[in-house]
Image: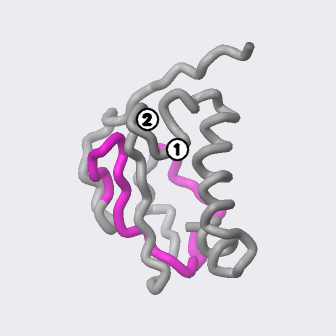
Amino acid sequence: PFIFSEGFMKNRLSLHEMQKILSENAARNYRLDSHKGRINLSKDADFVFIDPLEKTKVDQEKLHSKGKYTPFHDRVFKCRIEKIILRGNVIIDHTNLLVDPGFGSYYKSSSIT
């Protein structure tokens, strides 16, 4: 929610720029662009659905992560994540985690050439 709230909602980034930063460039920088980063038949279907009319207050006690600390604790963002789809599967619906630990996949990054 940080980049959407602080970037897009404050007219600092366009949706296209957000997509490049969060998906395409990130996948390329980590050499995962053979699987991630763009909408394409040969790539994973990963999507985040955001409601820009709602707000989110971050509570580090409710994180779906092994890391239980965030510098965004108690911060309010001008959007709310509604749904996350990973490899075509809904994994988060509102605040409900719908998959068991270990659902993720490990991708070895491609070698530097």
Indicate left or right for 7 with 102 as reference: right
Label located before the other in sequence (2 or 1): 1
* Image quadrant where one finds the C terminus: top right
Q: Which residues are magenta?
A: 66-92
Question: Which one is nearer the viewer's eye here, 69 or 92?
Answer: 92
Find numbered disc 1 in the image and state the secondary structure of the residue it sits on: loop
Q: Which mark is residue 50?
A: none
User: Which quadrant holds residue 100?
Assistant: top left
Q: Is residue 101 left or right of residue 51?
A: left
Amino acid type for the residue under numbered disc 1: Arg
Can you tell which mark lies on residue 38? 1
Residue depicted at x 69% and y 71%: 7
Q: Amino acid at mark 2?
A: Lys
Which numbered dot is residue 43? 2
- Circle 2/circle 1 CB separation < 8 Å: yes
Residue at the image point whose x is 53% and y is 27% from the top: 34
Vertical position of residue 95 compared to residue 101: above or below: below
Can you tell which quarter of the image residue 80 is in? Answer: bottom left
Q: Does residue 55 sit above or below 112 in this rendering?
A: below
63 is higher (above) or lower (below) than 44 = below
Q: Nearer the viewer, residue 1 or 42?
A: 42
Q: Position of residue 102 (x, y in %)?
A: 33, 33
Classify 33 as above or below 71. Answer: above
Q: Is residue 75 magenta?
A: yes
Q: Position of residue 41 (x, y in %)?
A: 39, 37
